[in-house]
Image (spheres, rainbow, N blue to C red):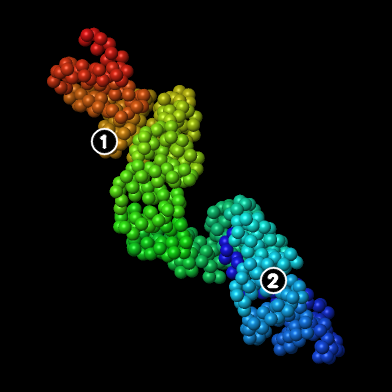
Amino acid sequence: MKEFILTLFLLFNFAVVCHAQTDDSAATLSPKELKQLTKKANKGDVESMVKLWQYYANEEHEDTLLLVKYLELAADAGDAEAQTSMGASIIQGLYGLPMDVDKALYYTRKAANQGYDGAIYNLGLFYLNGMGVEKDTDKARSYFEQAAMQGVAAAQFYYGACLSTDSATIDQAYFWIQEAADQGYVPAFAVVAEHALTEQADYAKALKYAQMAADEGDVRGMEWLGWMYYQGCGVDKDLDQVRYWAQQAADRESDVGYTLLGQLYYDEESYIFAKIYLEKGAILGNNQARLLLADMYHEGKGVEKDTEKARALLQDAIADGSDEAKLALSMYNLLDNHNDLDAVAHDEQSAEGNDPAALFILANRYEVGKGVEKDLNKSFSLCKRAADMGYAPAQYTVAMYYGRGQGTAKDDKEAFNYLLKSAKQDFDMAYGALANCYYWGKGTAVNYPEARYWGEKGVEKDDSTACYIMGCYYYKGNANSPDYVKALNYFQKSAELGSPDGLYGCSLCHKFGGPSIRDYNLAFKELRQAVDLYKKDGTDNENIPLAQYNLAICYQNGVGTAKDYKKAFYWFSQAAKNQNNDAPEARKAIGFAQYNVAYYYYQGMGTAVNVTKAKYWLRKSAANGCQKAKEWLREMK
C-alpha cells in the first residue's frame, strides 16, 4: 500500500460531528420552543445549548454567529460532542473561527479524555501531523486504534494506513481499510480498489470500488478506472472510457489523468497533443509522463530530437525514485555511446542493487566494450545473475552465450534450459530459438509437436527462425506427408524477414519441391543469395556448409546455371573447410564436400591434379563418416 494515504487528508478530515447526531426536533422548533431553549441555555442548561447549536447549524435557519455562540457554550460546559466539533472547527477555520492550534487541541483533549470516539480520532491526527504537539506516529496510531475499535470509519482508515507501513501487519491494515469502506468512508474506496487490483487480482472488486470512489468525486477512483479501461483489467479495453475518466481526473489537476491522456495520444502517434498532456503530468511529478516525454525527445517523435533533454527528464524521474528511469538512462547511455565515467558509474550503481534489468544492461556494456574493457566472461557472469533472478531477456541472452560458447563453455543443454525459461515468460525472442532446439534436438530430445507449438508462437511475432523451422516442419513432412507449398510460404516469410536460412529453404523448395513450384533458375538464385548473406552475417550456422555444398552441386551439374567446374571446386572447398559445426546434417554435407574436393584434385577438375591433397581430403571425409571416402582409401592401399 502506498504511504501517501497517511498524509493525504490530514488537514481536512477532522471529525466535526463524528456521528452526525443532530436532533431532528431541533430542526423544527416552533418560535415558542426556540425561546424556551434559549432561556434554558442562557441559564446554563447544556442540553439546550447542544440543541440550539444543532438548530443554527441546520441549512433552513443557519446563523453562524449563534451557531458558534452555543457550540462554544456547550463545549465550555463539558459536552464532549461539542468539544470535538469546536476543536475541529477551529483547526479548519470553519464558521469564521480563527485558526488556533493550541485552542483546537485544548477542546479535542477535553473530549478525548471523556472517551468520545471522534475526539480520540482527531487527537490522532494532531499527533500524526505534529500540530500543537511533537509529531509522534506511535501515539497517532494508538489513538486511531482506540477510535477504530469504537467504529469510527475515518479512524479505521488511518489505523489501517499506519499498519500498512509494516509488512508484518499488512493484512490487518487491509482489514481495517475494508472496514472503513464498508461504512461508506469514501477515501477508503480507492485504496480498496488498488489493493484488489494489484495484490488480489480481483478485477471485479477493483472495478466496483474504483467506480464507487469516482462516483463520489474521488480523483483516485477516476485514475484507477482510467487505468483499468486502458489495460483491460476486469473490463474490455475501452479507449473512450479511458479518455472520459482521464479527462475527469485531469480536470481536477491529476497528474495521472494528464498522463493517461498523453499516453493515449502517444499510442496514436499524435505526438503534438501527447506532448501537451505529458508536460502537464511531468510538471506535477508523474514519472510515467517523464519517461514518455524522454522517449519522444530521444527519438525525435513530434519534437526536435534532443537527447540531453531526454536525459534530464530521466534524471528528474530518478531523483523521484523511479527504477524504470534508471534503466532507461542506462539504455540511452548504450544507445548514445555515452561511455564516460559518469555513464559507466551510473550503470554500475544501478546494478549494485541487484536489479536484474540493471545487471543486464551492464552486461551489455562488457559484451561490446562500451566505456569498459570488453570482457565476455564478466558479461556472461552479470547476465547469468540477472537470468537466475528470473529476468527473461537475460535468460535468452545466457542461452545464446551457452549456445555459442562465449564467456563460458559451450553447453547446449543449459542453452535449452534458459531458452525454455525465457519463452515460458512470453519473451517472444526466445520462441524461434526454442523451436529450433526441439526440431533439431539441440540440448534436448527431438520433439516435433513442441517445435511446432513454439514455432507457431514465433511466427505470430515475425520471428525469422520460427518461420524457418515451420518451413522445415512442412518440407520434411514431420506431421504427415511433405507440403512444399506450405513450406515455401514459411520459408519466404523467413527470407522476407532477412534470414539467409529462409532463402536456403526457398531454394530447396524450388529445386526439390513439387512440379507446381519447381524452378531451377530461381532455386540457384536464392541459393546464391543465401550463401552471400551467410558470409555477410559472419556467424556459425549449421546451414552454411549445406548451402555451399548445394551451390557447388548446381555449378557441377549445371542446375539453374551454366556448368563451371572451377566454381564447383571453389564451393566444395568452402564447404569442406567448415570445422565448428556439429549438426548431423551439416557434418554429412561437410564429409561429402571433402570427398568431392578430393575427387576434383585427383581428376584435375577445376584445379590442378594433386594426389597428395586428394588423399588429405579423403581422410578428412572418411573421418566425417563418408563411406565412399573410406572405400576409396582402402582401394588406394
* Number of residues whose C-alpha sits closer than 10 Å to that of mark 1, classed few (under 14), some (14–19) or many (20 or more): few
Residue 564: image location, x then y, percent = 19, 24
Q: Circle 2 is placed at which residue position?
A: 121
Residue 444: image location, x then y, percent = 45, 29
Which residue is painted at 32% across and 45% down in the image? Answer: 375
Residue 402: image location, x then y, percent = 39, 36
Q: Inspect the image, locate mark 1, and give the three-letter code of the amino acid beneath it.
A: Lys
Which residue is painted at 36% across and 44% down in the image? Answer: 378
- State the residue in front, 470 or 144: 144
> Would you say 251 lies left or right of 156 here?
left
> Would you say 603 lies left or right of 64 here?
left
At mark 2, the secondary structure is: helix
Q: From the viewer's perspective, is residue 362 above or below residue 461?
A: below
Cβ–Cβ below 8 Å for labels 2 and 1? no
- Between marks 2 and 1, how big is the CA–CA gap? 77 Å
Which residue is painted at 82% across and 82% down in the image? Answer: 47
Q: From the viewer's perspective, is residue 462 above or below residue 576?
A: below
Q: Inspect the image, locate mark 2, and give the three-letter code of the amino acid beneath it.
A: Tyr
- Can you tell which mark lies on residue 535? 1
Q: From the viewer's perspective, is residue 5 above or below residue 361?
A: below
View extreme (left): residue: 608
- State the residue in front, 18 or 292: 18
> Would you say 240 lies left or right of 573 here?
right
- Can you tell which mark lies on residue 262? none
Q: Is residue 361 visible?
A: yes
Work out whether mark 2 precedes mark 1 in sequence or the reverse, and give the earlier one.
Answer: 2
